[in-house]
Image (cartoon, rainbow, N blue to C red):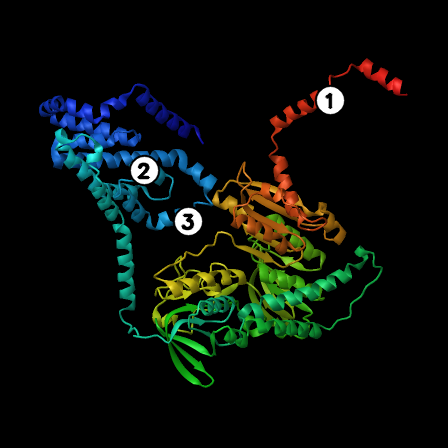
Amino acid sequence: MNMRKIVLALAITLIIAIFFILDLGRFFSLDYVKNQQAAIDAYRAAYPALTAGIFFAIYVAVTGLSLPGAAIMTLAAGAIFGLLWGTIIVSFASTIGATLAFLAARFVLRDWVQEKFGDKLKAINAGMEKEGGFYLFTLRLIPIFPFFVINLAMGLTPIRTWTFYGVSQIGMLAGTLVYVNAGTQLAHIDSLKGILSPELLASFALLGIFPLIAKKIVAVVKARRVYAKWSKPTRFDRNLVVIGAGSAGLVTAYIAAAVKARVTLIEKHQMGGDCLNTGCVPSKALIRSAKLLSHIRRSSEFGIRKAEADFDFAEVMERVRRVVKEVAPHDSVERYTELGVDVVEGVAKITSPWSVEVATAEGTRTLTTRSMVIAAGARPFVPPIPGLEEVGYLTSDNVWALRELPHRLVVLGGGPIGSELTQTFARFGAQVTQVEMAPRIMIREDPEVSELVTQRFHVEGVNVLVNHRAKQFLVEHGEKLLIAEHEGQDVRIPFDAVLVAVGRVANTTGYGLEELGIPTTRTRTVETNEYLQTLYPNIYAAGDVAGPFQFTHTAAHQAWYAAVNALFDPLKKFRTDYSVIPWSTFVDPEVARVGLNEQEAKEKGISYEASVYGIDDLDRAIADGEAHGFVKVLTTPGKDQILGVTIVGEHAGDLLAEYVVAMRHGIGLNKILGTIHIYPTLAEANKYVAGVWKKAHAPQNLLAWVERFHAWRRGPARSPEAAVSDANAVT
C-alpha cells in the first residue's frame, strides 16, 4: 500500500474516531432533531440557501465517511425542506456521499483485496463487469442491506464509477421518498421502527427483486424475438439430440440416457471422435513404443552392457491401430445403444431450433427435439502458406496412415501436439526439424519448462528452430524445401515430409449454424454463455466446438453442464465451472499443470510465492534413472493456499492429480505435508515440495525460543575448565 493510500486511510480513521470520541452522534438522534426543529425552521426561513447548502454538505460528509445518522438526516430533510426539496437535496447528497465512500474504498483497498483474493473473486468480478448495474439496483431497493456496506463493497469490484453513481441515484430514490415523506410528519414519529414496518419492508423486498424479474423478462423477450420466425412443434420426438460422438457428445448422451430422457446421438464419421481415432489414444500408443526404444538406447545407464531393437515402423503403426480397435468398444454404437441412447450414423443438419435433419445410408429423416447439444469437435488448422498444398502435408488426423518412416521430417508447431510428435518420430530414427515462430516451444509454459524439454530434444537429435516463420514451400530439383524467415533472413530447410501441428479449429460449418444465425467467437468457436447456451437458449454447445479449452477431459466436464441444463432448464441451470482445469503434455520429460504458472501470474498481476522441489533429489527417481525435472507450486503470499502447480518429470500427469483434488476442495500444502506418502515413490515429490514451503515459513522467533528451552533443559552451561576436567576423568 503506497503512502497516499495510507495517509487517506489514517485521515478517515481519525475523523471517525473524533466523531465517536466527541459523541457527535448525539446531534443525529431523533429526539435532538425534534427538539431543535423550531430553531432550525427559523434559521431556514432567514437563510434558506445557506441552510440547504450546510445541510447538503453535512449529509455528504456523513454518507461519505459511512457515519451513523443518514436516516435521521433524511427525516430532518422532510421536516425542514418539505417533500419536494427534501427529496431533491437528500437524493443528490446521499448519492454523492455514497460515491465518495465508494471511491475511497476503491482507492485504499481494492488493489489489495483483488491481489489477495483475486482467484476467489473471478466469478464476482465477471458478473459485476457484465451486470453490475442490475445487482446494485437490487441491493439499493432493499433497505435491509445497510447502504454504507454496499458503498464500500462495491468499491472493491470492477463496476464503473458512473454506473455506480447513476444506479445509486435511481435505486435509493424509493427509500428516500419514504423517509422524507415521513419526516414531514416528524412530530408524530417516535422511532424509526414505525417508519419501516414489516409490510413496508416486504414491499421493498418485492421491489428489490424487480431488476431480477426484469432481467428474466428481457431474456424471455429476446428469446421470443430469436424464435419469432420459426414454427415450434406442439410435440417433440426427443428430449435431446446430440450432434457429434466425441468426448462431449458421448458424455452428454450418456447422462441424458441415465436420467431416462429420450436422446439421439448423431455421428457422421467415427464413434469416439478425435480422441479415440486420431488424438489421445493413437498418439499415446505411438509415444509408448517410442519410449521403449529410448530406454533400449539408454541401456548402459541401467547396467545393461548392450541392448538393441529391431523394428519395422509399419508394424509399430499396426500396433497403434490395434490399440485403437481395442479401446473402440468403450465408445461403440453397441455400447451406447445398450445404455438407452438412440445412435444414428449419418450427417446432421439443424433446420430449426427444434428440428434436425439426418441423412443416413437408408435415406433422410427429420427429428424434432426440445433441446440439442452441438458437440461437433475440431480439426487441425492448416495455415495458408504458399506451396503447402503442392508439396502435400500430414496432420494429426492423417499421420496414422503412415507405414513408412519419413527420413527427414519437418514439424510445424511447437505446441503440445507438435512437440509430442516431434520427439516421437525422432525416437524412431527420423531426422526431425521442429519449426516454431514463437521465441520458444511450449510457449504457454514457464521458460524453464520449455528449456528442459528443448534440451532433451537436442540430446535426442531434434533440430529445434524457434523464431522461424514458415514463408513458403517449394520443390527444387525434385527436393522439397521449406523457406523460413529468421531474423530477417531466409533459411532453407530440406525435407521429405511435413507435419502441420499449429493448432486446431472448431467445426462450425456445414450443419446449419449459418442458416440459424448462431454466431461464433473471435477464436472461431461457437459463442455460448456461462450455461453453454447459444443464441437459441435450447441449443447448447460443448467440447472443442465451444472452447475455451480443447482437452478431452474438459469436453467431458462441459458435457455434464450442457446435458443437465438442456434437460432441466428452466427448473434449474448451472454455470460452467472452469476454476480447476488440469492438463498434460506427453513429451519426455512429461509436463503437467493446473491453475496458474509464474508467467500467467505475472501477466495478471497476481502476487504469489513459488516453492520448488527438484526431482533429481528424489530417491525413486534416482533408482529409476529419471532424476530430472521439478515440482513447482505457487501459493498465496504467507499462506499455503495453492494457486497453481507445474510438474516436469516422469509421470507428471499422474502426480498432478493430488494437486487437482487439493485445489478443487481447498486443501493447502500443510495438509499435503501431513499426509503419508509411500516410500519410495515419485509421489513423495508432492510432499517434499510442501516441505520446501514449510521450511520457508518456519517461525524463526519461536524456534529461537525453543532452542533456548532445550538448552535450559540440558542444564547450566559448564565452564571450559570443568569440561576439560570431565574429559580427562573419562579418559
Residue under pointer 3? 123
**Viewer-nearest of labels 1 and 3?**
1
Dot 1, how many residues are within 10 Å of its Cα: few (below 14), some (14-19), or many (20+)? Answer: few
Counting residues from the start of the chain, the first of labels 2 and 3 encountered is 3
Residue under pointer 1? 714
How many labels, in total?
A: 3
Q: Are marks 2 and 3 in contact (CB under 8 Å)?
A: no
Counting residues from the start of the chain, the first of labels 1 and 3 encountered is 3
Q: CA distance from mark 1 to mark 3?
A: 57 Å
At horizontal 32% and vertical 34% (from top left) the residue drawn is: 101
Image location of residue 718, percent across then percent down? 77, 16
User: Which disc is residue 151 wearing?
Assistant: 2
Q: Quadrant of the N terminus?
A: top left
Residue furthest bottom in the image: 362
Image location of residue 35, percent across then percent down? 15, 22
Q: Secondary structure at mark 2?
A: helix
In depth, the one of 159 and 568 nearer the eye is 568
